């Protein structure tokens, strides 16, 4: 399996509910290297670009309103099979279908505010990493635990 990079965003409710440490801890424990990280209040323009595929859907406007309401934490994660592994850790979109043990399953109450965005394919990972990070903000490192996983 190949080492991949994926993009994750902790939605505004994460900082508000003081869950940032909990979620970062889960990602680190599961072997993701956090190779880029920043906190930012999204502009409407950036949020629209990020969620362009959903334009016109009934949840689109309220989603943008929520995503721009308070700061988010964005990151690039590196690991073997990172894209699928992170989607599994996040759990399904609908918080009531997300199993306990997943981030959305453990902490999600309202689907719109389902805590975490995770890229769903190589193409979207590439697009989203470029949308939110410049090359000089990415700092990969060697994983000293690699042989113990
Ligand atoms: N039916 C819905 N009701 C409310 N919010 C939704 C609904 N579907 C999706 N969303 C919101 O829009 C985001 C983007 O949707 P989507 O790309 O389908 O899910 P995912 O984040 O799992 O990739 C979701 O994470 C969620 O915040
Ligand atoms: Mg999606």
Image: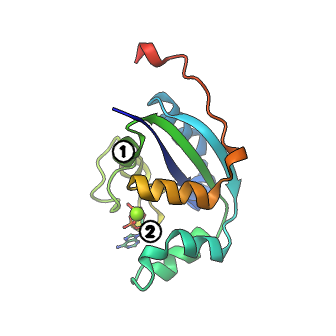
| Residue visible at 41% across and 52% down in the picture | 122
Q: Quadrant of the C terminus?
A: top left
Say if mark 1 contacts mark 2, CB within 8 Å: no
Q: Give how far across and how far down residue 87 sits, in percent.
A: 37, 49
Q: Is residue 10 left or right of residue 36?
A: left
> How would you rate the neighbour count of disc 1 (Cα within 10 Å): few for under 14, some for 14-19, many for 20 or more?
some
Asked if ligand 1 lies within 8 A of label 2, the reply is: yes
> How would you rate the neighbour count of disc 2 (Cα within 10 Å): few for under 14, some for 14-19, many for 20 or more?
some
Say if residue 91 shows up in the picture. Answer: yes
Viewer-closest of 123 and 82: 123
- Residue 86 lies in what quarter of the image? top left
Q: Give how far across and how far down residue 56 sits, in percent.
A: 42, 86
Q: Which mark is residue 52?
A: none
SS assignment at label 2: helix
Q: Quadrant of the N terminus?
A: top left
| Residue visible at 52% across and 50% down in the picture | 7
Q: Is residue 136 left or right of residue 87?
A: right
| Residue at the spot of label 1 | 102
- Residue 12 lies in what quarter of the image? bottom right
| Residue visible at 49% across and 34% down in the picture | 32
Q: Which mark is residue 112?
A: 2
Viewer-closest of 34 and 141: 141
Q: Give how far across and how far down residue 36 sits, in percent.
A: 64, 43
Viewer-closest of 51 and 116: 51
Asked if ligand 1 lies within 8 A of label 1, the reply is: no
Say if residue 118 shows up in the picture. Answer: no
| Residue visible at 45% across and 81% down in the picture | 55
SS assignment at label 1: loop
Q: Estimate the spatial distance between the alpha carbons at disc 1 and disc 2, rounded to whole Å.
A: 16 Å
Q: Is residue 144 left or right of residue 36?
A: left
Q: Give how far across and how far down residue 148 sits, in percent.
A: 43, 13
């Amino acid at each position: 399996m190949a080492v991949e990079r994926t993009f994750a965003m902790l939605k505004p409710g994460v900082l508000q509910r003081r869950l940032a440490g909990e979620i970062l801890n889960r990602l680190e424990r599961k072997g993701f290297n956090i190779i880029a990280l920043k906190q930012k209040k999204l502009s409407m323009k950036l949020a629209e670009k990020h969620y362009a595929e959903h334009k016109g859907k009934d949840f689109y406007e309220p989603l943008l309103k929520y995503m721009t309401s308070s700061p988010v934490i964005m990151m690039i994660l590196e690991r073997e099979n990172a894209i699928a592994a992170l989607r599994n850790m996040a759990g399904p979109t609908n918080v009531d279908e997300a199993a306990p043990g997943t981030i959305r399953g453990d902490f999600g109450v309202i689907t719109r505010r389902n805590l975490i965005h995770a890229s769903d394919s190589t193409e979207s990972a590439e697009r989203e990493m470029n949308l939110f990070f410049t090359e000089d903000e990415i700092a990969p490192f060697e994983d000293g635990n690699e042989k113990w996983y």
